[in-house]
Amino acid sequence: MPERTVFYISDGTGITAETLGSAILAQFDFTPRHVRLPFTDSVDKAHQAARQINHAAETEGKRPIVFATLVNAEVLAVLSESRAMLLDMFCAFVQPLEQELGLKSRHRVGRFSDVSKSQSYRERIDAINFSLAHDDGQSNRDLASADAILIGVSRSGKTPTSLYLSMQYGLKIANYPLIPEDFERQQLPPAIVQYKKKLFGLTIAPDRLAEIRAERRPGSHYAALENCRYEVAEAETLMRQSSIRWLSTTTKSIEEIATTILQEIRPERLSY
């Protein structure tokens, strides 16, 4: 059972509060119950949130932890009177920066309120659409504009990594599977040979690959350990022969994989 309830409360989407809060809580060995309360942008909504907080405190016998990103002082004041440990992230970070920079923050409600009008937002959407259109070698069109092209055997982590890089950093990422025909020819797929400088390879331990594939196609040749060993060995040999940078995804998170790729390809254009 969860030991304590953690609330993420924001007048916007709550992404900032949840991201920072989760990163901090990851340092502690306990399993909280998560409650997300986005768009808490009025005193009435603040009172509703306070009632939920107080109910959790009464039920669990422990005061909840609240990570908040709120710019409305009245809303924050209501939550301050609840039975919670309130961590106001704007107070913790924005106020010291105001003093250091000698500038007043915008105190804008919801950092995404006008983002759809920005050029960087449109570029991020374009990047996501590009990565979806170029997933698993679906299209060879406009590969010249790709920031990177990921290659590797099926189920080695290419698709989630591509989408993460697009959504998080606004990068256009294509990905191509390495298949038995490529191994027989001992050559990269013809469509991507001319973009060798953009290529980055992903590999994975054969036993882990077999587990992943078995979830999708149990009992198939595709998921057989012997076949996975063959494909991984051939893919790694091909990448070495082609001098392609690559890494193993076996024990790495998507975030770690993406960070390593960013360090290697060092794209000039990054979106945050």
Image: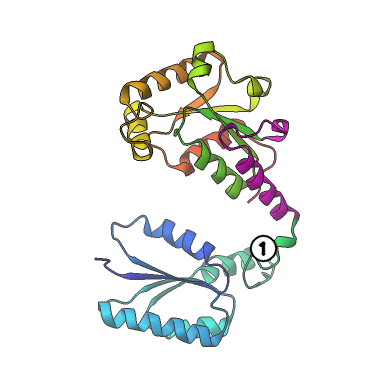
The magenta stretch spans residue 83: no
Residue situated in front as seen by the camera: 272 or 39: 39
The magenta stretch spans residue 138: yes
**Quadrant in which residue 191 is drawn:** top right
> In x, y percent, where is residue 262?
57, 37
- Residue at coordinates 67% horizontally, 24% vertically from top-left? 195
Task: Classify 10 Å Cα crowding around label 1: few (below 14), some (14-19), many (20 and above).
Answer: few
> In x, y percent, where is residue 32?
32, 65
Q: Is residue 196 visible?
A: no
Residue situated in front as seen by the camera: 88 or 247: 247
Tell me which segment is drawn in magenta: 119-146
Point out the image quarter for the N terminus: bottom left
Residue 177, placed above or below residue 188: below
Residue 211, placed above or below residue 26: above
Q: Is residue 60 visible?
A: yes
Residue 160, placed above or below residue 71: above
Q: Kindly identify the amino acid type of the residue bearing the numbered disc 1.
A: Leu
**Coloring scheme of the render?**
rainbow
Q: Which residue is denoted by mark 1 in the rendering?
A: 101
The answer to whether 267 appears left or right of 256 in the picture is right
Main secondary structure of the magenta stretch: helix
The secondary element bearing badge 1 is classed as helix
The answer to whether 65 appears left or right of 89 in the picture is left
**Quadrant in which residue 106 is drawn:** bottom right
Residue situated in front as seen by the camera: 145 or 268: 145
